[in-house]
Amino acid sequence: MDKMVFTNPVLPGDYPDPSVVRVGEDYYMVCSTFQYFPAVNVLHSRDLVHWKTIGHVIERQEQLDLTDMPDSFGVYAPDISYYEGKFWVVVPYYHGQPRCTNIVYWSERPEGPYSDGVALNHHFIDPSIFNDDDGKRYLACGGGWVQELAADGTHLLGEAKQVWPGTGGAAPEAPHLLKKDGWYYLILAEGGTFFDHMVTVARSRSVWGPYEECPYNPILKQQDPEKRIQKTGHGKLIQDPQGRWWFPHLGGRPLKPNGSTPLGRETFLQPVEWTEDGWPIIGDHGTPVEIIHLHPEEVSAVADDIHSFVDRLDRNKLNPTWEWVRLPVSDGYQLGIDGLVLQCKPYLLNTPQPTLMLTRRWQHEAFQAETELRFFTRSRGEEAGILLYRDTDAILILSVRNGLGQTTGLPFDVKRLHENQELEGLYLQVDRYEHGKRRMLLQQKLPIGEGDSVRLRLSVDVRADVCTFAYAAGAVSSDYTPLDLTVEASYLFPEKAHRFLCFTAPRVGIYARGVLGLEQGYAAFREFVYTKAD
């Protein structure tokens, strides 16, 4: 029977630093989520190709407080393992100081709920747990450091030892230990999570070393800048029930050689072959492959539909593909018969404070996102709508706004307030936030009143470098009116951040907010639709 063909990435969009564990015939993955909440998404698959988000490890503020978390800080590369009937997730929490705290959580169910966290150590990044066949447990950390972990998983034993620092590449990280045929293999990512990213390996007869380097290193690296898959690294060896080996890992798809990767760092899957002398070789002799072949009986397509997403927002719990930008404002939202109700709480979009911005990942280079909302305002300056969000330095918003009086987040202007005191009603507005500054791009009166439905639509095409806007007065999506405005999409790309590191890619979502000291209204969102564009 012919094999079925699948194309990398297996998980498009901002799903970096994948760690996968197999339990029976099921695979579970966790990824980095940084400042987003709930944190550490857990995904399930039966074939390593089709993935479905089933929950999060960190769902309560007392598990980990992400209040005021700076951009690209928070939850770095987590690791998931299985031991004694429990799932163990160790999370590196980088919180703006020159250190990283590694925290472990556990649950009997992969989707949770997970325990409160227990801190294991500081200073090391990218922890992972290795459970040896003699019952001993170990924690491996960035730089090739290893330390014994107590059987109950709550504390470390003895001293940490650097067993293998890598081959000399920059930033040796993402360590994973594996035991096979009496050998301990230590996998590392080196070169930094950019275009020099690569995977290396060494092995020893003892977990403590000495380790011998693989003569075929790097065992995965993209050497051709013209190829589609770049930045390959940070992965974990996994054996399937049929005995074959695979390597889920992160990578990126630049728009041109050495160019921007608008979807961020995505999850790819590579086949693995073992040499006669016992070394793993990933992909096509160390080069990442774009095509994956599986037998039809191996395919289990229970997964999130990545080509379209329709959320009626009518359940008692948010779909797990949604994540807030940091912690949501206290008492800021409810789910009920009116859909998702976001209160018009006061906050600034471009500061690291609690928000009411609900987001999900871009998963295509061209897509449309639309939402239906009804606005019940109480004060001038309240706003609600749809947005594109990379971080506090890059936000693009299409919103419905109550009146043209004082603008949230701008200095109080008595003259402007007086001039606009007659301009009541609901207005459509497009705002661009960039490097701490807000610029209004468009503003026009809407032909609707309070409580009437309005649909807002954003369209993005990163290859054409455009974002466009449309609205529909009423609940009928076919009656959209395009706005005479285009904005370049590229200012949202991670590479455009004016700081040393930007680990997060842009997202799309919905929001509402109000004015400090005034009575608060709310916006009721009835639907959100994300669709891949042709």
Image: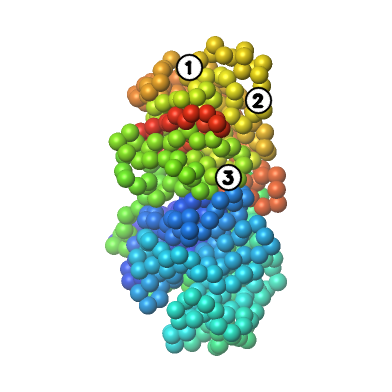
24 left or right of 217? left
Q: Where is residue 517 in the image (x, y as percent from the top left)?
A: 55, 31
In the rendered image, the vertical position of residue 261 relative to residue 250, given as above or below? above
Which residue type carries mark 3? Gln
Residue on which disc 1 sits: 425
Which residue type carries mark 2? Phe
Give the CA distance from mark 3 to mark 2.
21 Å
Tell me, for residue 414, which label it has, or none: none
The residue lying toward the viewer, choosing from 376 and 30, is: 376
Give the CA distance from mark 3 to mark 1.
29 Å
Q: Earlier in the sequence, mark 2 or mark 1?
A: 2
Q: Position of residue 246 (x, y in %)?
A: 45, 68
Give the CA distance from mark 2 to mark 1.
20 Å
Q: Which callout, 2 or 1, points to the residue nearer the camera?
A: 2
Q: Which of marks 3 and 1 is nearer the N terminus?
A: 3
**Residue at 45% from the left image edge and 56% from the top image edge:** 60
The reply to whether discs 2 and 1 touch (Cβ–Cβ < 8 Å) is no
The reply to whether discs 3 and 2 touch (Cβ–Cβ < 8 Å) is no
Residue on which disc 2 sits: 412
Residue on which disc 3 sits: 353
The residue lying toward the viewer, choosing from 6 and 146, is: 146
**Residue at 31% from the left image edge and 43% from the top image edge:** 315
Q: Where is residue 201 in the image (x, y as percent from the top left)?
A: 59, 75
For mark 2, give the secondary structure: loop
For mark 3, give the secondary structure: loop
